[in-house]
Structures are given as C-alpha cells and as structure tokens.
Amino acid sequence: MVMKYAMIVGYFGILVYLGYLASRRVRNMDDFVIGGKSLSFWVAAFSAQATGESAWLLLGLTGMGAMVGFSAYWVVVGEVLGVSIAWFLMANRFKRLTDKYASMTVIDYMASRFRSKDNLLRVVSAFVLSVFVLIYISAQIDATGSAFERFLDWDYHVGAMVGFVIVVVYCVAGGFLAVAWTDMFQGVVMLVCLVMLPLVAFLTLSNSGDIYQGLQTIEPGLVNIWGSGGFTFMNLMLVLGMMLIGLGFMGSPQVFARFIAIKSEKQIERGKWVAVVFTILVDFSAVSIGLLGRFIFTQQGIEPDTILGNGAQNVLPELVEYVFPPLIVGLYVAAVLSAIMSTVSSLLIMAAGSITHDFYEKTINPNLSGANAARLCRAITIVLAIAAMLLAITVSILSPDRTIFWFVIFGWAGIAATFCPMIILSLFWTKFTEKAAIASMLAGFLGTLFFKFVVQGFETVGPYFVALETLPPSFVLSLLVGYLVTIWSPDPVLEKQYVQDLSDLESTDTELDILTAASVRDV
C-alpha cells in the first residue's frame, strides 16, 4: 500500500508543480483562457485527446469490452473517424478563422462568424454549455471517487473530494496553460499504461492461444462483431450508438479550444498524426483490456457484473492487480486519475472562460480589465467546481446502479449535439445564419433531454433508442433544424460577408506561398 501511495503522491506533486509553472505566465484573460495561443503540436494533440477521452476510456470502455466483447471495437472505429475528421478536415479552417476574428473562445468565433448584433447567441451558448459541462464534470468527479474506492479502499466521498481539490488548485493557479501541460503529462501516462497492460497480461498467460475459444465458450456473442445474436436490428442500433460516440470530436468546445490555442497551422499538420495514432492505441488497448479480463476472471453462466462490478467497470483494476506489483498498481491509479482530471480541468477552464468572457464581459461589463477578468474567471472556476461536486454526490445517492460509461456519455452527448452540428455548418456552409445557429443549438440541447428522458421510455421504440443512445438522434435533429431555419430565413448579406472572409484567407495563403517561393529562390 505504501508503494501505491508513493506513486500517487508523486503524480499529484507533478500536477501541482506544472500548475505553479503555468501560473507564472498568466498575466491576463488571454493567457488564462487560451494560454496566449502558444501550444506546440505535441501539447495540443495530447491535450485534445486526453480531454476527449476522460474516465469513460479507462473504466467505462474497458468495462464495455468485458460486457459485449468484439462489438466494442466499433467504438474504436467511430472515435478514429471522428478525430480524423476534426483534425484533417475542420481544424485548419477553424484555426484560420479564429485567428482572423481574434477569437478567445468557441463562442467568440460564433459571434464573429455571424456578425452578431446582439448578445442572444452568446447568452444561449454560455447557458447550454454550462449545463452539460456541469453534468460532464460531475460524472468525472463521480469516477474519481469510484477509482479511490476501488484501488485504495477509500470512502467514495473522500476520494471524490481529494481529486476535486487537486484539480481546482492547478486550474485556478495556471489556467489553460496548466491544463494543457498537465494534459500532456497525463496523456503520456494514459498511453503508456493502456498499451502496456494488455501486452503484459497476454504474455503472462500460459494459455494465451485459447483466448478466442475461451471467450466463445463463455458467451458466443463475445466474439461476434455484431454482438450476441449476430446481425439484428437491435444490435445494429447498439453498434451505431457505440460507433457514433466519435461525433463528439467534430466541434465540441473543449476539443476545439486546442485549435484556437495552438501556435499555427503547421503545428496542426504535425499534431493530427499524433492525435490519430494516440486514439487508435488507447481505444484499441482499452477494449482489449476488457476482453482479456473477461477471459481471465469469468466463466460460462456467470454474469460479469457479479465479478467485475456494475458494467464490468472494475475490469481494469482487477487486471492490473492480477498482473503487476503494488508500485505499478500505483501508476495505474495515476493513469485513471489522469483520464479523469484532464477532462475535468479542461471543462472547468472552458466553462469559466465562457461565463466570464462571453457572458459577463461581453454583455454586462465591457470595460472589464484583463487582470480583473482573470481573477473573476478563477472565482467562477471554483464556483463551477463546487456545483459539479454537489451534483456528483447527489447522483451517487439517487442512482447507485449508474455506470461510469453511460453517465459520462450523457454529458458528452449533450455538449456534442448542442455544438458540433452548428460548428460543422458554420465552417462549411456559407448560407448558414445566426438564427439557424441558435435554433440548432437549442434543438441539440432539448433533443438530448427529450431522447434520453422521454423517447427512451416508450414501450415500442424506447428500447431501440436506449441502444442507440442520445447523441445520434440529437445530433441529426440539431443538424436538420439548422438546415431548415437557414432555408426558411436566409441572410444574403451574411453569406457574402462569410464568402469574403474565406476569400481573404485564401488570398493570405497565396501571398504566403509567393513569399515562401521567393525566399527559396533567394537562398
């Protein structure tokens, strides 16, 4: 136990030290919210992916792999597609536009893109973002308590509080830069631990050649890519629900904030390969951990929940303790906390920055100075963190049978359905209007609640929407509403202005190409 604590204390010490180093570079709101647009491709890529993955990767997705088997690999496919589209197709244009508009936040970008004449867009965006951010953060805090409870036999509430305090300390001290630097460190820890565990576990098995047959004996559906029962309409809905989790990478503010903060497009060109490779390795490893745990710890006729916990979310801790000595177990506690804290810190800074900059500064007090704005943002960070902590404790009491996987996914779905369709349309459809953007966000926000708490309760179609989950239908609804409102209420003037913005960007690129070619000739 001493070895575990030594590793954890060392891990927390590094986080706090990185927060201290970052705090020395925070002089104004720009530094606190986007780190002065100074991120390298390594930091941006690891930070974006560590933020996007969260606790559901190490505890939720590993558990899903143990529960459903090979069909959980559809999550890997979906996440790789989502990350690839974000980095290869969306990031460069988004970076160019946010630099042109001098945007500090995603909501800043939206206000400039639509030439907002009032504050409705900012108010709606800040409100819906704050709601689902609180849900998402509370899910991560809940996972923190569960991790301490499982690994160290701590009381759930004590563990949640300790993790909460550490995150708040380095967030308040160093802002976005502290978040990005700690994300880089935490992403490396996650990557090493996730890749190492299934490899070492596989090599330690004396009957490793029997894994496929063993899983088939336990439950034939485990080795079927469509799940138990093969290809059925219900299984198709389950597969789509898992695969379309990757939609959340295509515009979620906590991910796209890294594109605002990265130094340049050249860094994006390098970072996109880091992001994709990272996603493939950690997601594939997570599902494989679940499969190995199911093979090692369960047998035919025994439900995995009875051995591996609710939703099999204890499969990673069980496999770690089965394979490694206590010191290495401590490293895996740090890895789980890394996945959780990287997301909590990113969401806290993003939400606090949005409330301070997009709501208070832009709509109430335009004369707020940079230093005062940074202080206010720190205070709001603390308030949001406390609210999320209280929500996590409330959910733990009211829903003791919850699983980390689906608790986190609900918060992820709300943010993604609200913002991703709107970001996609705003980048690639010149006709898209401000009215349509607001309508699209509200449709995604309300659609998430409607499909989760109303449609899933219907006797006939409800089970299919439970399988599909809330993100896909809410995403489609948001996209459709954005399209229809644009068609019904076009804005030709805004369209011309955005076309001119894109033309200006292309002209700048051409000028840079000419200057570069001339420099090469001179050399």
Image: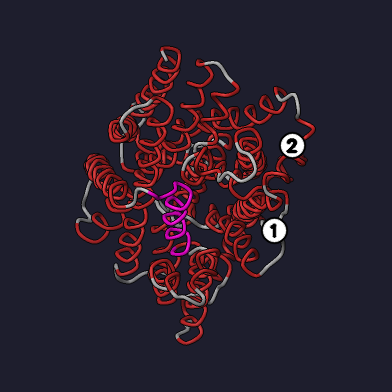
Q: Is residue 141 left or right of residue 306?
A: left
Compared with 324, 218 (above or below) is: below
Q: Is residue 29 left or right of residue 481?
A: left
Residue 70 in sight: yes
Compared with 266, 182 (above or below) is: above
Q: Specify the farthest residue to the right.
A: 209
Q: Which residue is mark 2?
A: 211
Q: Residue at x 54, y 63 (%)?
A: 467
Q: Residues within 10 Å of mark 2 (few under 14, many from 20)?
A: some
Q: Amino acid at mark 2?
A: Ile
Q: Residues within 10 Å of mark 1 (few under 14, many from 20)?
A: many
Residue 234: % across, % down: 61, 67
Residue 498: % across, % down: 52, 70
Q: Quadrant of the N terminus?
A: top left
Compared with 455, 48 (above or below) is: above
CA gap, disc 1 to disc 2? Answer: 19 Å
Which secondary structure lies at badge 2? helix
Res. 416 mark: none
Which portion, as a residue range, is magenta?
Answer: 401-418
Q: Is residue 367 left or right of residue 18?
A: left
Residue 147: % across, % down: 42, 33
Q: Specify the farthest residue to the bottom.
A: 488
Q: Residue at x 28, y 31 (%)?
A: 158
Q: Which residue is mark 1?
A: 226
